[in-house]
Image: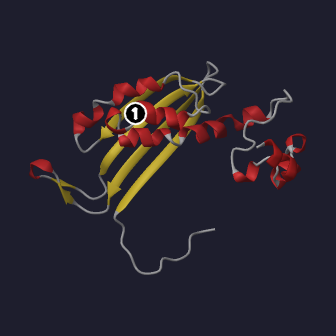
Amino acid sequence: MPLSDPACSRRPVHTRSIRVESYARDDGLWDLEAELVDIKAYDFPIRGGGIHPAGAPVHHMRLRITIDERFNITASEAVYEAAPYGEFCSAIAPEYRNLVGLNLLNQFRKRVRERFGRSAGCTHVTELTDVLPTVAVQTMADRHRQSSTGERPFQLDGCHALRVDGSVVRMHYAPWYVPAEAHSDER
């Protein structure tokens, strides 16, 4: 369903696009490649007397992480294609190798903020990391769904639709359904 029509006429100003693609590697690992692009809908002056043209990226950053079957990051690389302060912005890229060792499902966003918050990182590359846990879950969903280990599916209680006392879990994951009364006692 689309959004409702705007309340009044308007004009475009800024577009931020975030795109993530995931790949199954031949070595049994997975790559997640994230990209952030910011563009303005208008020309604007830049330092040194030039003009930044409408539609040209103001920010264009890429981040690739490699993960194992347990969602551990085994490799990481950040690159800059466009940044307002050029090499001063991109100088932080090598620091994002320090994502290696983090687990996407174990307080990942908190740990990223601890390592790359404020001046210890790049706002835009760090923002790209926010989407990685859910993309990784989507990447691994079929693999885990096909697993016949009998273990509780990892996505349960990950969102309101998959809460263990909800209708979706009752209908599709019956062995792990917990009636609301019993679930509230566990909390």
> Measuring 65% from the left and 40% from the top, which residue is drawn there?
138
Quarter occupied by the C terminus: top right
Q: Give the vertical position of 27 relative to 43 (above or below).
A: above
Q: How many marks?
A: 1
Q: Nearer the viewer, residue 45 or 23?
A: 45
Residue 24: x, y in percent? 62, 29
Horizontal side of 91 relative to 162 (left or right) equals left
> Measuring 35% from the left and 60% from the top, which residue is drawn there?
14
Horizontal side of 147 relative to 21 (left or right) equals right
Image-quadrant location for residue 77: top left
> Measuring 23% from the left and 33% from the top, which residue is drawn there?
87
Q: Nearer the viewer, residue 111 or 185?
A: 185
Binning the other alpha carbons within 10 Å of mark 1 as few (below 14), some (14 to 19) or many (20 upward) gives: many
Residue 74 can be seen, yes or no: yes
Q: Residue furthest top?
A: 27
Horizontal side of 12 relative to 132 (left or right) equals left
Residue 179 can be seen, yes or no: no
Q: Residue furthest bottom?
A: 8
Q: Residue furthest left?
A: 49
> Measuring 66% from the left and 25% from the top, which residue is drawn there?
70
Q: Which residue is mark 1?
A: 116
Q: Give the vertical position of 46 relative to 119 (above or below).
A: below
The amino acid on which the numbered mark 1 sits, given as a three-letter code, is Phe
